[in-house]
Image (tube, rainbow, N blue to C red):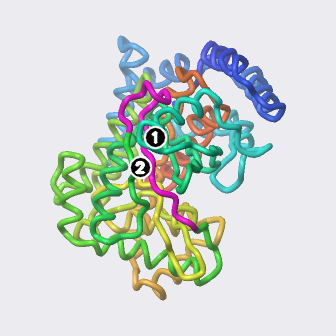
Amino acid sequence: MTVFVPDATLEAAGERAARLPLSAVEKERWSRVAAYGSARRPDQYASRAAALRDLIGLPGATDDGVVEAAGRLLAGAVATPDPITDRVLDAALGWLDDDIADAAPLLDLFTGHHRDPEGGPPQADPDHVRRLAGWLGERGVVLEDVAVISGGFSRLMLDVRWTGGRGVVRVEQDGLFATEGRREAAVMRAVGARGYPVPEILWEEPDPAVLGHPFFVMRHVPGGARTDDQGLDDMLRVVAALHALGPSAVCEIAAVDGITAAEAVPAQVRHWHGVYRAAVPHALPLLERCFGWLEANLSTTGPPVVVHGDPGPGNALQDGSGVTAVIDWELAHAGDAAEDWAYLALIRGRRLGSPEEWKQRLARTVGVEYDRTSWDAWEAFNSVKGACVNLTALDVFARTARPTPDQLAIGVAVHLRFLKRAIELTTAGTGCSHSA
């Protein structure tokens, strides 16, 4: 029981995309989306709800009602499983494997953070350029050049040059990843005021009328990602420096979210549960089980710190002398340092080294070590977080004027990849008969 994008949604998104100035490569990627839609199995929601209805013994429940009940059952039985719960979990795990198999073509289609889109980044929208030129002109700046920066998905990023200066424009993308620019800019200002290396915020524009979405402009900082040993060690040191900013920074950033530093970790669990429930029309029982597991097993490893949320070489600009700036702050928050380290060592850094290699580098470079229980718990949190945040791409894909195949891939295939890992971690040792 996972996610399914209706045929009508796929077709409508394809029709909207066809009205855009697509390159030959982009058109080919959309043809692969259409092929995926034709080849996958029909929506299994009703038949799976019927199976759950029989397993749980709720003959009069609606489809949504029985799925909600299954989610509550799985979440509540983390500590005390029973035969009925085991059968529900076993069925849900089998459905997860089926859905992962159906989504495989989308995972192959996904651009990912590790490579540029085929054919390179798109050209800047001429209308955006014209509007941006007028907006900058009102601030006494003469625009000279605009180029799209390839990379992440939560923002459209523009490399902007003007007479005597250069900046980066970060434009929101319909709420993708449940983040917004004003919060990101507030966090950047807070850490920057304490001497942390972060680009200076030059201007903010909350009105979506200018470029279609709110945006801010930050000063360009020279540098790029480094993956040599010195570069990786310097990246780790700058993350450790963030965690060491102190209680006043933690309290200021917690206040951005209307919480106290002491409640930061449970607030994060609640936040991602709310993000997921807002992104899909019905409960996802396996995710509900994961949240039940987190409530029972996730604990703090130290005092609250400022968490970046997406640490890695790609978000630490460096030159020959070290880190010049840390970027991409949309997921930053008050929380536990283990969230950043587990994400880096177990998820984000996988292409550059094994988890054990990262753990050794962390211990050697910044003195960070955790026991296996803590590592597993915080990897589980990050996997659940990934499963939830990627679901937001489904809503964007369904309604945005500029849908992309990546949005579909993120909302289905990448979501399922994170959910699979979360389930592996949270069902380990349960004795469930289905292999997770």
Q: Dot 1: within a 10 Å radius of its alpha carbon, few (fewer than 14), some, or many (20 or more) residues?
A: many
**Do the CB atoms of the residues marked 1 and 2 lie less than 8 Å apart?**
yes
> Is 386 in front, or is 155?
155
- Amino acid type, residue under disc 1 in the picture: Phe
> According to the image, label 1 marks what residue?
177
Quadrant in the rendering for residue 280? top left
Percent x, y for residue 424? 52, 54
> According to the image, label 2 marks what residue?
330
Percent x, y for residue 265? 26, 56
* Start-end of magenta stretch: 205-222
The image shows residue 68, relative to residue 159, as above or below, that is above
Percent x, y for residue 426? 43, 54
Say which element carries label 1: helix
3D distance between C-alphas at marks 1 and 2 = 9 Å
Residue 89 lies in magenta, yes or no? no
> Is 122 in front, or is 365?
122
